Image (cartoon, grey):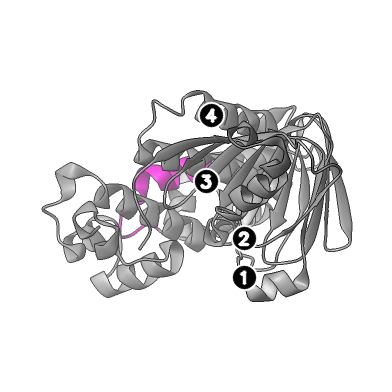
Amino acid sequence: MPARSYLVEEQTTTEVGPCERADFWSEHIASYQSRMGYRYTRRDNFEGETVRQRTGTYQLVRFHSDEIEYQRTAQQVRQDPDEDYRLLVSLSGRLVLRQDEEEAELTPGTGGLVSFGAPFQCLQDASTQAFILTIPTREIDGRLNRTSPLSAGVDLTRGLGRVVSSLLNDLYEQRYALTDPQFDAVSDRLVDLLCMLVVGDDRPDIPGHLAEVEAMVRRYVRDHAADAGLTGTSMARALGWSLRQIQLALQHAGTTPRDLIREERLRLVRDRLQCGSCTHMTITELAYATGFSSASALSTAFRRRFGVSPREMRPSAR
């Protein structure tokens, strides 16, 4: 069961002697990332620093260090399975990310999405500062309706990308003022926008009308998720569009009316489970109050989406 306490931790190689710093760095990174290899340009007096924020769902690390190469091999993937994604965002300097026979050069204003479930290589120069956000695989695959690893260069200088960059910076700047539900809520919205970028929602070749339809549909679903009668058809009727228009708009975002409705209902359930004023509600009552047909339907969908049952998500169960 995932821990729910929000933690902020800082580490620096200056805590140990110059000759021990490379080993210290390897052990430190290995303590919160999966197994990788490390290749140092110079091992003597290696310098590096991390600021780590985490809950049981997300982890954000801001780091800088001397020149280094990280590599995760096929053998390490088998020995230490980890299907979660990492969003790597350059703040200064240069990173080169290689996975699935693709290469992305990350300079300030660009980001890369990499899966730890497949081999990769990351080369970092000495002037690099960056964020790395760990995103559970279900948070990406559940939104995009895909299960294959992906790697993408993400433009963070305009549109949705700039909002993603701003949210990352805000999470870091406000690190000591956040609670763990707040950290997770902002991270959830950040992943929403990231998925829209990955499927190309801000590309100029996507018709503006479809983008407008999608935005209206998402807003409508968020406002009416608890309505048990909410369907793609009822939504189309209420908004004055055809069902085909709605399906086409959501298809560009990598989802469907049914998947979007289920996603919003599950988020609503999760928020109520973590809300102190809803502790009196049974799981059955929560199911009916959020549009699910039964407690069992809710429990099955909830576990598939979040990895725990609704009962286990409650603070009292932790």
Amino acid type of the residue that numbered disc 4 sits on in the rendered structure: Tyr
In the figure, is residue 86 to the left or right of 311?
Answer: right
Q: Amino acid at mark 1?
A: Asp
State the separation of the CA atoms marked 3 and 4: 11 Å
Marks 2/1 in contact by CB < 8 Å: the verdict is yes
- Asked which secondary structure carries label 3, the reply is strand
Element carrying mark 1: loop
Which of label 3 and label 1 is nearer to you? 1
Tell me the distance, in whole angstroms, between the alpha carbons under discs 4 and 1. 29 Å
The reply to whether dot 3 and dot 1 touch (C-beta < 8 Å) is: no
Of callouts 3 and 2, the N-terminal one: 2
Query: Could you say whether the residue bearing mark 2 is in a helix, strand or loop?
Result: loop
Q: Residue at x 27, y 48 (%)?
A: 274
Q: Amino acid at mark 3?
A: Gln
- Magenta span: predominant SS is helix
Residue 59 numbered tag:
3
Residue linked to disc 1: 80
* Numbered mark located on residue 172 in the image: 4
Instruction: Name the spot of residue 236 as percent of width and height, x first.
Output: 49, 52
Which contiguous range is marked in magenta? Answer: 216-230
Measured Cα–Cα span from mark 3 to mark 1: 18 Å
Question: 281 or 213, which is in the foreground?
Answer: 281
User: Could you tell me residue 185's position as x and y percent?
Assistant: 42, 40
